[in-house]
């Protein structure tokens, strides 16, 4: 029967099914779908690439029968000429996906990314390409990439410009595999960031090699101790212990700041890092001096964290102000990561074995077959940890009796 307004108006609801179809007897492929809830829609059913496909034209009421018939004829004609309206519609939808949407999908898929990494990714996009976040990903061309990479690199930061483009490259690679029209056909087929490699436009960033030199440790330590002149004693001691703990253990800044008391064993004289860069839990021994630092912290702090603070996380977040104070008081320029590099350089200079050094720093040894057979217990790290401590204390001209006085004075 031919679908007419009268037939559509009187079309009965399905009784035993969720929906029922009334097919037009004049135009093959044109039909009315009626659901159990009474919704009536016009559809087209036909073969597309040898598969039966059903496409909704619209709801009855928004479309009249004749309007729907006209659209059905047009759609069936396009399909007969080789068009794939389903794929075309999906391709257009994908091409409208913005960088912000693609980035959100990327983060959803990369569940293993750490919160700090995600935060840095968000920051670098806002720093380098803030005006692109609402731009369709498909509209970001290689010319735009090259121009923005050069602009930000020359006017702001080459390292951040590189990082932003590496992130964009990862998002494009993700999109090329994630957003597919059908049967594995990608809607986005080209990664424009790859042109930077073709044009050899990446900035060469020299890895920082700065450390606190041995002869500078006396002045640096004196500056740390003078923090009590700039802060109330409670805060001064907290910053002093924070800087010293990183220098004497080689921990990363967030690993030290977020350390929990549940992961500190004062009886066994060990502490465990949970949220490490390589995601492996890492247990380290305490040297005598490190033990005294933890004892001071335990005496003066309450709650979950060794370095508690009134922040969103509950622990120290931004050491920059205290760091600048130490630089001013000591005359020694340094960064938090310089403290870790100083620990590493010191340990290496003492001829500590490469395997022990990597374990102290929680570095993976994936390419070393021998390392796979080595089990380095935490107790085997106690001696090298103490060696580094003794060397640093001598370099800072901190005598043994001064260490004892320092620990006892802060405990009382």
Image (cartoon, rainbow, N blue to C red):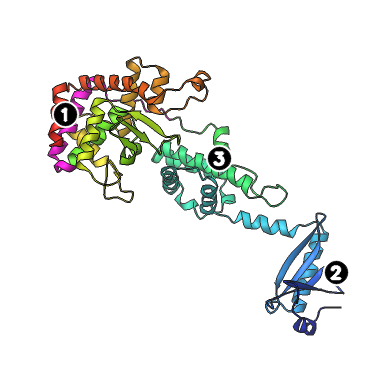
Q: Where does the magenta region start and end?
A: 205-234
Q: Earlier in the sequence, mark 1 or mark 2?
A: 2
Circle 1 SS class: helix
- Of helix, strand and loop, which mostly describes the magenta segment? helix
Q: Position of residue 261 (x, y in %)?
A: 30, 40
Nearer to us: label 1 or label 2: 1
Residue 222 numbered tag: 1
Residue located 18% across and 24% down the image: 218
Circle 3 SS class: loop
Q: Position of residue 131 (x, y in %)?
A: 47, 52
Nearer to us: label 3 or label 2: 2
Residue 76 numbered tag: none
- Tell me the quarter of the image containing the C terminus: top left
Depicted 185 relative to depicted 380: above or below: below
What residue sits right under mark 3 in the picture?
A: 193
Q: Position of residue 58 (x, y in %)?
A: 70, 72
């Amino acid at each position: 029967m031919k679908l007419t307004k009268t037939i559509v108006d009187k079309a009965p609801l399905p009784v035993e099914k969720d929906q029922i179809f009334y097919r037009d007897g004049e135009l093959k492929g044109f039909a009315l779908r009626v659901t159990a809830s009474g919704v009536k829609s016009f559809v087209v059913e036909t073969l597309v690439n040898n598969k039966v496909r059903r496409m909704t034209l619209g709801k009855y009421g928004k479309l009249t029968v004749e309007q729907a018939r006209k659209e059905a004829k047009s759609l069936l004609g396009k399909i007969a000429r080789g068009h794939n309206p389903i794929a075309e519609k999906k391709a257009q939808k994908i091409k409208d996906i913005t960088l912000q949407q693609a980035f959100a999908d990327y983060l959803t898929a990369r569940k293993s990314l750490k919160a700090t990494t995600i935060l840095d990714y968000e920051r670098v996009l806002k720093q380098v390409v803030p005006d692109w976040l609402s731009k369709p990903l498909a509209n970001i061309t290689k010319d735009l990439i090259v121009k923005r990479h050069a602009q930000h690199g020359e006017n702001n930061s080459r390292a951040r410009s590189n990082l932003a483009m590496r992130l964009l490259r990862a998002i494009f690679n993700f999109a090329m595999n994630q957003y597919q029209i059908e049967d594995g056909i990608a809607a986005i087929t080209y990664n424009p960031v790859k042109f930077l490699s073709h044009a050899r436009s990446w900035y060469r960033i020299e890895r920082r090699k700065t450390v606190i030199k041995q002869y500078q440790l006396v002045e640096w330590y004196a500056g740390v101790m003078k923090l009590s002149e700039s802060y109330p004693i409670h805060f001064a001691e907290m910053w002093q212990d924070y800087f010293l703990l990183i220098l004497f253990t080689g921990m990363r800044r967030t690993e030290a700041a977020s350390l929990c008391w549940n992961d500190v064993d004062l009886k066994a004289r060990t502490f465990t890092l949970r949220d490490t860069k390589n995601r492996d839990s890492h247990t380290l021994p305490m040297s005598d001096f490190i033990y005294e630092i933890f004892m001071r912290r335990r005496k003066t702090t309450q709650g979950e964290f060794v370095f508690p603070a009134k922040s969103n996380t509950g622990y120290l977040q931004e050491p920059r102000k205290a760091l600048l104070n130490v630089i001013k008081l000591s005359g020694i320029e340094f960064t938090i990561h310089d403290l870790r590099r100083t620990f590493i350089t010191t340990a290496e200079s003492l001829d500590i074995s490469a395997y022990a050094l990597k374990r102290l720093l929680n570095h993976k040894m994936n390419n070393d077959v021998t390392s796979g057979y080595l089990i380095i217990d935490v107790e085997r790290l106690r001696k090298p940890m103490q060696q580094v401590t003794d060397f640093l204390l001598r370099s800072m001209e901190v005598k043994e009796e001064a260490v004892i006085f320092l620990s006892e004075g802060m405990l009382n």
